[in-house]
Amino acid sequence: MSNPAPLEAGALHPEALASYWMPFTANRQFKAAPRMMARAEGMHYWTPEGRRILDGFSGLWCCNAGHSRKPVVEAIQRQAATLDYAPAFQMGHPLAFELAGRIAAMAPAGLNRVFFCNSGSEAVDTALKVALAYQRLRGEGSRTRLIGRERGYHGVGFGGISVGGMVANRKMFGAMLAGVDHLPHTHSLEKNAFSRGEPEWGAHLADELERLIALHDASTIAAVIVEPMAGSTGVLLPPRGYLQRLREITAKHGILLIFDEVITAFGRLGHAFAAQRYGVTPDMITFAKGVTSGTVPMGGVLVRSDIHDAFMRGPPWAIELFHGYTYSGHPLACAAGIATLDLYRDEGLFERARAMAPVLEDAVHSLRASPHVIDIRNGGLAAAIELEPRPGAPLARAFDAYLGCWERGLLVRQAGEIVCLAPALIVEESQIAKMTGTLREVLLQLA
Ligand SMILES: Cc1ncc(COP(=O)(O)O)c(C=O)c1O
């Protein structure tokens, strides 16, 4: 395995880094001490200097099949040379239909129509718009409210931040969408600290939806959107029975239930979709990330067929939904998606994730006695270690832990005061041991 070519002199000079305004990044800190990736393969990254980094986070919750997998790389290369782009509106290309069919075949029964976009944020905005339009089409036009959840992350579009529940992502951006309300989050250190898998306490929090319905009236509510497992605010597993309860209440009141599965779809919890793991079928599922194993941007929404069919009216030449993106169903993304789904199937990667989940669980819970640790949570191939905040310096301790891992050759993710692991589904036992070994060392040395 060859190392990447050495960095050209001056490439890391601060001037060379000035133009790029980096997303969700401490730009000044980064540009003073850059953390660059130059190459990736399997479970590893390499820095421009040739340092090997074990990827404990599937890039950013997305490279579920591991990095630069040959069949996916070749499919993208072939597609770029064959059909680079086809107009997305009023025109098609075979791979988009093939991929939609493949995804529908993996989805819970009844969810068999797929709308493509390019990211999780776009998938969320698409699902919210479909929900509003569907309610109107079925004669329930007064249903314009959307319900999200505290500590939810649904991307960065105005729809997503409105239903999302992360204050830093919301407070700078004005009033956002009108008519949005939020369920309480389900995180409780007092009740559920150090739970393995789904916690016992908290199903009753779904009943808060009845309270919101009593407040606003069901006739004003179009949809509820939740992540089955909240990833970005630190791996919050659904309390046992919680999602079932949400499903019952939404169905009873004619409210659509949307699962945002941008993180959980395509194997993170050992199934194609979290809906299958929890045995709860929503009305729509958003996905992104793992559909192409992070290789080419793609997102989408799985929609119940009768919701889709409600739009199929009017004269045959009429456009049924005034929504879409130039790059919806982009040929390169579709080629990458089909090759990725082949890999998941041929290598049994969802089953592998199920088999490795207890290994990750035991490994992360072995950190319980390490300094600063106040909670450890896990589900499938996702885990979180919550640290006690450093007095007077919120987020600093977890950031130092993140940097400590990086310096020792491990990529993790910081989410607030929480350090998260989410390795690719190809991860080996020895690599999980290395991840927790590194974390143990870092926690010991952390101020
Ligand atoms: C649940 C969820 N929804 C939406 C998004 C937004 O996805 P993107 O960054 O592709 O827009 C994310 C990203 O992490 C996510 O975790």
Image (cartoon, grey):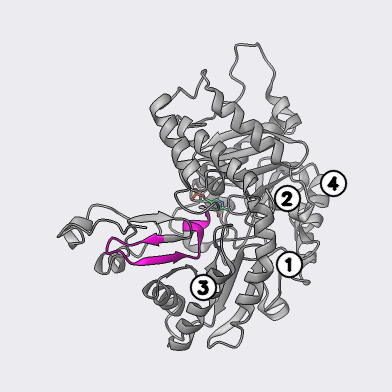
Residue 302 seen in the current view: yes
- Give the CA separation, mark 1 to mark 3: 23 Å
Crowdedness near tag 2: few (<14), some (14–19) or many (≥20) residues, C-alpha within 10 Å: many
Residue 187 located within the stretch drawn in magenta: no
- Give the CA separation, mark 3 to mark 2: 29 Å
- Give the CA separation, mark 4 to mark 3: 45 Å
Q: Position of residue 278 (x, y in %)?
A: 76, 55
Q: Is residue 321 left or right of residue 73?
A: right
The earlier-in-sequence mark between 3 and 2 is 2
Q: Position of residue 236 (x, y in %)?
A: 64, 66
The earlier-in-sequence mark between 2 and 4 is 4
- Give the CA separation, mark 2 to mark 1: 14 Å
The earlier-in-sequence mark between 1 and 4 is 1
Give 186 or 81, whichever is nearer the viewer.
81
Kindly identify the amino acid type of the residue bearing the numbered disc 4: Lys
Give the quarter of the image for residue 231: bottom right
Residue 132 seen in the current view: no
Can you identify the residue that label 3 sits on? 435
Question: Which numbered disc covers residue 275?
Answer: 2
Question: Which numbered disc covers residue 252?
Answer: 4
